């Protein structure tokens, strides 16, 4: 028996066990405990994932071969996965749960569900996918976004400057800001990056990134940021309370989500180096950030990639390195571009 179904319908049937159409057999890994830990309401979750017109395609497969979808309410992302990624997540699931339970402000990706669907037919093709939190589900528009690894080889966008817009994900060598964080934010940020990197290193994970979204407080009519005078952004710190003694507004109270900062424009000394010269030109910004792509083991393919690329490039500049080295390099880079605001 043959059948035809578009990808949006296929994904919807994967997520909804009672979807009436399509010869799909669902195998479901339920993450109820994690969703409860992340304070996800079960009814709202099902509406977000399985409601009418629930999903939209964000991108076609790139080098990873994965499709990315977003729910219409922007709360969740859905990514098709390689078998090796599924194995990595299942292997580290206990440690992952213990980590996110111990550190409420962890910056690592929030996972809500892991699923596998097997299509009935001669091929018996399996499609695996994971449901994650959408880091950029925020009331603030994202004006610039960066995917930062701390490596330099190939870490530049391939788009001409005229085609770069707010939806373009820029990379390490495109970065032209140094982020100044208030003391309490900076200290908590450093502590959490250290803890998260230690967890990933212990799980033999590498090739992860810090995804950074920047909301610039004032934008001109041409879309360019307006320079701000130092210190006009209200000072707020983790755990601040409002005037009535209650907790601060949620959007300003959690590490990585809607953090106030100052972004100092910087110029790069060399197109292939990380060293940047600050210009003294500041913009008041809101930062949204998290550690993503945390399912890559340092497996045989990555070891071979490291060996091959090391013949042609500086071994310290490539992404595929041992998890311990990756963690050190990642933290060194992040702590150079995120600094304490001393003003």
Image (tube, grey):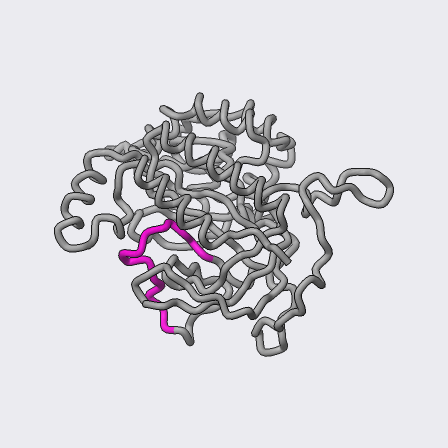
Question: Where in the figure is residue 266, as x and y percent of width and height?
Answer: 47, 67
Query: Residue at the location (61% across, 60% down)?
Result: 285
* In the rendered image, the vertical position of residue 275 relative to residue 127, given as above or below: below
From this viewpoint, which residue is outermost toward the right?
Answer: 244
Viewer-closest of 17 and 271: 271
Question: Where in the figure is residue 178, as x and y percent of width and height?
Answer: 50, 59
The stretch of residues the image draws in magenta is 146-160
Query: Residue at the location (60% across, 55% down)?
Result: 341
Question: Is 213 left or right of 206, judged from the image as shown?
Answer: right
From this viewpoint, which residue is outermost toward the bottom?
Answer: 222
Question: Is 57 left or right of 142, judged from the image as shown?
Answer: left
Q: Is residue 7 visible?
A: no
Verify whether residue 36 appears in magenta: no
**Quarter of the image where one finds residue 79:** top left
Question: Where in the figure is residue 311, as x and y percent of width and height?
Answer: 12, 51
| Position of the N terminus by quadrant | top left
């Amino acid at each position: 028996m043959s059948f035809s179904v578009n990808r949006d319908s296929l994904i919807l049937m994967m997520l909804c066990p009672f979807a009436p159409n399509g010869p799909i057999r669902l195998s479901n890994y339920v993450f109820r405990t994690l969703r409860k830990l992340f304070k996800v309401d079960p009814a709202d979750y099902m509406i977000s994932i399985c409601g009418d017109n629930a999903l939209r395609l964000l991108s076609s497969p790139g080098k990873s071969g994965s499709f990315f979808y977003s729910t219409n309410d922007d709360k969740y992302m859905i990514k098709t996965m390689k078998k090796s990624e599924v194995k990595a997540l299942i292997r580290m699931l206990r440690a992952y749960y213990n980590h996110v339970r111990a550190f409420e402000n962890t910056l690592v990706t929030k996972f809500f569900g892991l699923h596998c669907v097997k299509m009935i037919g001669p091929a018996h093709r399996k499609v695996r996918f994971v449901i994650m939190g959408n880091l950029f589900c925020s009331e603030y528009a994202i004006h610039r976004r960066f995917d930062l690894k701390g490596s330099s080889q190939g870490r530049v966008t391939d788009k001409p400057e005229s085609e770069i817009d707010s939806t373009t994900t820029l990379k390490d060598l495109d970065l032209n800001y140094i982020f100044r964080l208030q003391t309490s934010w900076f200290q908590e940020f450093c502590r959490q990056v250290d803890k998260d990197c230690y967890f990933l290193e212990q799980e033999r994970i590498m090739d992860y990134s810090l995804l950074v979204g920047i909301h610039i407080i004032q934008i001109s009519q041409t879309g360019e940021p307006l320079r701000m005078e130092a210190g006009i952004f209200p000072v707020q710190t983790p755990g601040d309370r409002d005037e009535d003694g209650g907790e601060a507004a949620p959007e300003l109270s959690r590490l990585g989500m809607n953090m106030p900062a100052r972004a100092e424009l910087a110029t790069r000394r060399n197109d292939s180096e990380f060293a940047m010269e600050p210009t003294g030109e500041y913009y008041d910004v809101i930062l949204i950030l998290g550690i993503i792509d945390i399912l890559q083991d340092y497996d045989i393919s990555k070891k071979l990639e490291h060996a091959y690329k090391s013949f042609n490039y500086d071994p310290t500049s490539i992404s595929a390195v041992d998890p311990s080295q990756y963690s050190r390099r990642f933290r060194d880079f992040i702590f150079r571009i995120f600094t304490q605001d001393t003003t």
